[in-house]
Image (tube, rainbow, N blue to C red):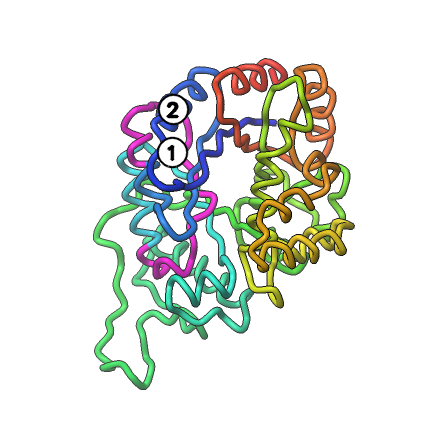
Amino acid sequence: MRLGLALGYWGRGPSADHVPLAQEAERLGYDSVWTAESWGSDAFTPLTWIAARTSTIKLGTAVAQMAARSPTTTAMHALTLDHLSGGRVLLGLGLSGPQVVEGWYGRPFPKSPLTATREYVEVVRQVLRREAPVEVDGRFHAHPYRGADGTGLGKALKSITHPLRSDLPILLGAEGPKNVAQTAAIADGWLPLYWSPSRPEVYGTTAFREDFLVAPMAQVKVCDDVAEGLLPVKMMLGFYIGGMGHAARNFHADLMARMGYEEEARRIQELFLAGRREEAVLAVPDAFADEISLIGPRERIAERLELWRKGPVTDLLALAPDPHTLRVLAELNS
């Protein structure tokens, strides 16, 4: 099982720790470093900054939101950074949810998410393969555009820049069983959310091919007090389950419910949406936070790490905010 460092997205501003952490992860033999985006910092610019200050570690987006860019724009970002970094990009994509897509990007959330995702990936693939001008007669992504409100003058084009790699890996964030099954069929890897090594059936029964990447994120912290170490995990879960979606349509809450915590998920939503955020965090069960993270003394993490190795996970993307935890995890995984 390879290790990756997940840096997430910025809060109020950039963290001075991100580049040093990425450099330390590279020194320790981590395979990859990942950035994200929500409705603030973007995923690609920080990776470019990190690429200029590292030499071997792979550079992943987990995830770049599809609504943020047309698929050709995403392909342009990926092929540009891939050239500048010497072929180190892993392109992780995600659809996000209705509140973000419609509220932040000002676009309709697709009524058929599976179709929209499939078309998006196909456009990116065509750009990167550069075998012919991009032509996709899609419901959500049409190239050239032939809509009634267009000019009808659109021309199928092929990238001026020759991509460094036509097979640049594409990974998808997917939560529901149908989405996971499609991901296995059209992508090179999967970025699971809230992966529990003891509940793989929650995501369905899809079998993955041998070279397929399964790369979940997990908060990792070497500490003596497990309950205290779980607090940041519970804060993250309180925000995502309570606030990253509408009360009637929150994919994160739905996933928590499928994992056996339906009553708790709805309670977290209720508290968060009522403005009682501290209570929402405290309502996150320690057991749920614990099973999707690696928190505690070195010996406890070592024991629990064995569960992650036994399943389909190929890459553990560690949300690890300190060099000591990065070093311990590297030692335990060696």
Q: Is residue 158 above or below residue 334?
A: below
Closer to the N terminus: mark 2 or mark 1?
2
Q: Position of residue 219 (x, y in %)?
A: 58, 32
Quadrant housing residue 225: top right
Q: Amino acid at mark 2?
A: Thr
What SS does tag 2 mark? loop
Confirm whether the magenta stretch covers residue 67. yes
Quarter of image, res 145: bottom left
- Residue plotted at (30% across, 36% down): 48
210 or 172, which lies in front?
172
* Image position, residue 19 (x, y; %): 35, 26
Horizontal side, residue 210 vs residue 105: left or right: right
Residue at numbered disc 2: 56
Res 214 → quadrant: top right
Of 147 and 95, nearer the camera is 95
The magenta region covers 48-73
Q: Nearer the viewer, residue 110 or 295?
A: 295
Residue 84 placed where, x, y %? 26, 35
Q: Is the Cβ of the residue at disc 2 closer than 8 Å to that at disc 1?
A: yes
Q: Which residue is mark 1?
A: 88
